[in-house]
Image (cartoon, rainbow, N blue to C red):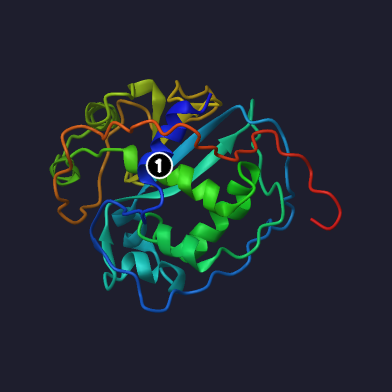
Amino acid sequence: MLRAALALLALTAPAAALAQAVQCSLPAQLPRPRMVLPDRGETGRIMPIGGYTLALSWSPQYCSTARGGDSAFQCKGRHGRFGFILHGLWPDGPGAAWPRFCRKADLLPREVIRQNLCMTPSVQLLQHEWAKHGSCMASRPELYFDLARAFYQSMRFPDMTALARRDTLTVGQFTDAFVRANPRLRPEMIRVRTTRGNWLSEVWVCMDKALDYARCPVGKTGAKSGALLRIEPGPAMPRPSASPLVPARKPGLILDLDPHAQVPGKGD
């Protein structure tokens, strides 16, 4: 069921991940995250997984309005200039609800942060993704981020500089460009999310519970195909290889996914 995902994982582990960036350099002293707990009125939710979402954020849009210390690494430019980053790999439920905060999540080890900070350039966001989403998929953060990194690194991106210059770009045209860069995808497998003013915020890639790319469920909405789309200009990115890498299979690799997580017992 997870053969394709395991092959991707075999290809990428254990190297550190690089976001779509002009450059990314880690600070000598990595910041430490804060614990992430459910918000007030929010509780952990254990339920069967019906699919997954790979959420890719357009960093220039986020940084155009971001304020505060948590965004400094991503947005100040001292350690990197980013294009698409990985927001997260999210388990979806079989309906409108989704699993969240499935088990206690300790602070991430420094090595996990080091391997993934150039892919998800926020220590606090990494902690949040593990606590809220990863805890429902894997027993250890290394396993969750290895899988997320494998899918992220398999993505290819269109020429965002050229698309940002277009005054009459539509969501449908952007979707077509994204699909051309990723031949395994079809337009119905992605959702484009925008902010107020029709600015590109995120691209959501939908997967079924076998981690194969799939048609997005009805409840997973995005901007309408005919809507105009504006793109905050970002750094000029080096051109990637013409096609995604074809991962080689690695027999015997076992990923400790937990798609049917149980409520943690006392003391967990």
Q: Residue furthest right?
A: 266
Q: Is residue 95 or residue 180 the one in the foreground? A: 180
Q: Residue at x 52, y 22 (%)?
A: 218
Q: Residue furthest bottom?
A: 29
Q: Residue at x 25, y 51 (%)?
A: 232
Q: Is label 1 in a helix, a strand or a loop?
A: helix
- Name the quadrant containing residue 157: top left
The answer to whether 62 appears left or right of 123 in the picture is: left
* Residue 267 drawn at (x, y percent): 84, 58
Question: Which quadrant is home to the C terminus?
Answer: bottom right
Three-letter amino acid code of the residue under disc 1 = Ala
Q: Residue at x 33, y 38 (%)?
A: 154
Q: Is residue 16 or residue 135 the one in the foreground? A: 16
Image position of 1 with respect to 231: above or below: above
* Residue 68 drawn at (x, y percent): 44, 72
- Name the quadrant containing residue 118: bottom left
* Residue 127 drawn at (x, y percent): 55, 60
Mark 1, Cα crowd under 10 Å, few <14 / some 14-19 / many 20+, is many
Residue 191, visible in the rendered structure:
yes
Q: Which residue is mark 1?
A: 150
Q: Residue at x 37, y 43 (%)?
A: 152
Q: Is residue 144 or residue 237 the one in the foreground? A: 144
* Residue 161 drawn at (x, y percent): 15, 47
Image position of 54 with respect to 83: above or below: above
Q: Is residue 61 or residue 217 the one in the foreground? A: 217
Residue 222, visible in the rendered structure:
no
